[in-house]
Image (cartoon, coloured by chain):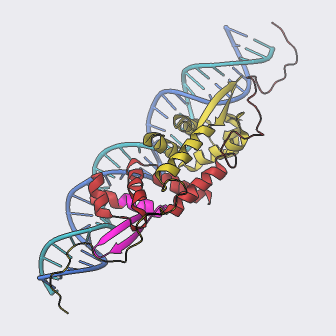
Chain colours: A red, B yellow, C cyan, D blue
Amino acid sequence: MEIKTARLALAGLAHDTRLAIFRLLVPAGLEGVPAGVLAEQLHLAPATLSFHLKELRHAGLVSRRRAGRTLYVAAEYAAINALIAYLTENCCQGAACLPAAGSKPVPAARAPRKPKTSRRA
Amino acid sequence: MEIKTARLALAGLAHDTRLAIFRLLVPAGLEGVPAGVLAEQLHLAPATLSFHLKELRHAGLVSRRRAGRTLYVAAEYAAINALIAYLTENCCQGAACLPAAGSKPVPAARAPRKPKTSRRA
DNA sequence: TCCATATTTCCAATATTCTAGAAATATTGT
DNA sequence: ACAATATTTCTAGAATATTGGAAATATGGA
C-alpha cells in the first residue's frame, strides 16, 4: 500500500461520523446497509451522510450497490486489511510492533554537541 | 482501546507531515530523534514541526525526552499496537478481517419493499 | 406520463486545521 | 549575568473540512 493510500484511509476513518458509519457496516457483511438506514441510525441529514459516504468511497473504504431505489453501502474489508498491513509494516518495527529487538537502548540524558574544551566551576 | 482514542490516533496519522514524522521515528527506536533533525529532514519551520509534534503527542503517538538543550522525540509503539488492535477488532470481522465466514452472501439486486400485488406488462 | 421514494449534487455558511513569523522559555557554556 | 542553541507558545491569516437546505437525478410503480 502506498503512503498516499494509507493517508487517505486514515483520514477516512479519522472522523466520528465516518468511523461510526464504518463500524455499522462491518457486521453487516457484504450485503451492506441501505444508506437511508445509516442516516436514520446516526441521525444524519441526507446531504451530510452523502458527504461522508463520498469521503469513505474516495478512500476506498466502502462500496456501493444499487437495489431498486435503495443504495446499499458495504465495508471494503480489503481496504482495512491493507491499512492494518501498512501500519504493521511501516509504523511498527516489522512484525510485532515492538520497540525493535536490536534498537539502541534509551541513552541517559546528556547534551549532544560541544565536547567542552576547558572546564571551570 | 476506546473509540475516542482510536479516532485521535487515526487523526494523528492522517496528515502527510505527521505520517512522515512518525515513519522517521519508527526505525529510530526508543532513543528517538532530535526535533531539530526532524525539522531539517522534512524542511519544516520550527513552529510548524512543533504544532505537529503537539498533535502527535496529544494522540499519544509519540513521547518526548530532553537531553540538554535537545528534545528527542520517539515513537510510542504501544499506541500503534493499540490502534492496529482496535482496527482488527472493530473494523474487521474479528480476527482475519475477512467478510465474515457466516455473513450473508451478496443478494442479487432487487427492490426491498412493495411485494407487488398485481402484475401487468 | 406523473408521482413517490432514495439519494446525490450544489451551494453557502460555519468550523476546524495548518502554517509560519515573532516573541517567549529552557538549557548550557563563558 | 549574558550569549547562544533548541524548541515552544502566541497569534493571525490561509486553507480545508463539515453541515444541511434546496434542487437535481435515478428508479419503480400506477
Q: Is residue A44 visible?
A: no
Q: Nearer the viewer, residue B37 or B22?
A: B22
Q: For the N terminus of chain A, which image quadrant? A: bottom right
Which residue is outermost to the right? Answer: A117
- Which residue is located at x 72 percent, y 43 percent? B27
Q: Nearer the viewer, residue B78 or D21?
A: B78
Q: Quadrant of residue B116?
A: bottom left
- Which residue is located at x 28 percent, y 76 percent? B111
Q: For the C terminus of chain A, which image quadrant? A: top right
Q: Quadrant of residue A54?
A: bottom left
- Total numbered labels: 0
Q: Position of residue A78 (x, y in %)?
A: 53, 63
Q: Nearer the viewer, residue B87 or B118?
A: B118
Q: Quadrant of residue A30?
A: bottom left
Query: Which stretch did the figure color magenta?
Result: A51-74
Q: Nearer the viewer, residue A39 or D4?
A: A39
Q: Is residue C10 above or below residue D5?
A: below
Q: Is residue A27 visible?
A: yes
Left or right: A55 with respect to B12?
A: left
Q: Position of residue A8 (x, y in %)?
A: 52, 57
Q: Position of residue A89 (x, y in %)?
A: 66, 52
Left or right: B78 with respect to D4?
A: left
Magenta-span inclusion, residue A69: yes
Q: Position of residue A102 (x, y in %)?
A: 78, 40
Q: Is residue C16 above or below residue A50?
A: above
Which residue is outermost to the bottom? Answer: B121
- Which residue is located at x 53 percent, y 49 percent? B14
Q: Is residue B104 above or below residue B35?
A: below
- Which residue is located at x 17 percent, y 88 percent? B119
Magenta-span inclusion, residue B100: no
